[in-house]
Image (cartoon, grey):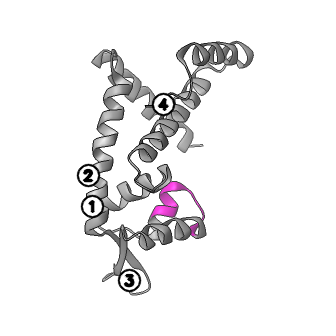
Amino acid sequence: MATIFNKVDIVNQYSWVCIMFNAISIEATFYLAHAIKQQLGSQLEAHQLGIAPMHVRVLKIIHKRKSCTAIDIANLFKRDKAQITRLLKGLIDQGLVKKESNPEDKRSQLLVLTPQGKALQEDLLSISEQMQKQMTQDIDEKDLDVFIKVAQTMTKNLANT
């Protein structure tokens, strides 16, 4: 498995950023989010799944929700509907997602995973579990609980502005 940054480089970059901008929490979360995205991209490439990290998020949403439309995804990701439509077109063309009639609104269509999409979702779950195990190794469970609560509060605080 290829490593994008070595640990010394990350620590040096992180320390410099913290000193220069005095924004430890923002920079730390930025580096964490970047590392997760890079690792996910590497795992998707290594497993030759032919999808991007954004596709993973969309597939997960469709899998978890009973009824989901393109507009739901656009609203959830705070993205333009045209962007989401292009993203979904790729997933539909790959045979991972299909559209079905929405019995509650004839003007919209529900998105559902195909059997191939469901199988891929299982592979993605396995990759996600491996990444979580790697990411949280040597971290005390109490510290992890605190991190999750703080991250959720920060997210909520930013959503309320």
- Say what secondary structure mark 2 lies in: helix
Residue pictured at 42% horizontal, 72% vertical: 92
Q: CA distance from mark 1 to mark 3?
A: 25 Å
- Say what secondary structure mark 3 lies in: loop
Residue 106, compared with residue 66, is above or below; it is below
In the foreground, 53 or 58: 53
Q: CA distance from mark 1 to mark 4?
A: 28 Å
Q: Nearer the viewer, mark 3 or mark 2?
A: 2
Q: Earlier in the sequence, mark 3 or mark 2?
A: 3
Q: CA distance from mark 2 to mark 4?
A: 23 Å
Chain part drawn in magenta: 73-81
Which disc, if any, is residue 105? 3
Is residue 76 part of the magenta span, yes or no? yes
Q: Are the residues tagged 2 and 1 within 8 Å (C-beta)?
A: yes
Residue on which the image places disc 4: 2
Q: CA distance from mark 2 to mark 1?
A: 6 Å
Q: Nearer the viewer, mark 4 or mark 3?
A: 4
Residue pictured at 52% horizontal, 34% vertical: 33
Residue on which the image places disc 1: 118
Q: Amino acid at mark 1?
A: Lys
Q: Position of residue 79 (x, y in %)?
A: 58, 59
Q: Earlier in the sequence, mark 2 or mark 4?
A: 4
Residue on which the image places disc 2: 122
Residue pictured at 46% horizontal, 69% vertical: 70
Q: Residues within 10 Å of mark 4 (few under 14, many from 20)?
A: few
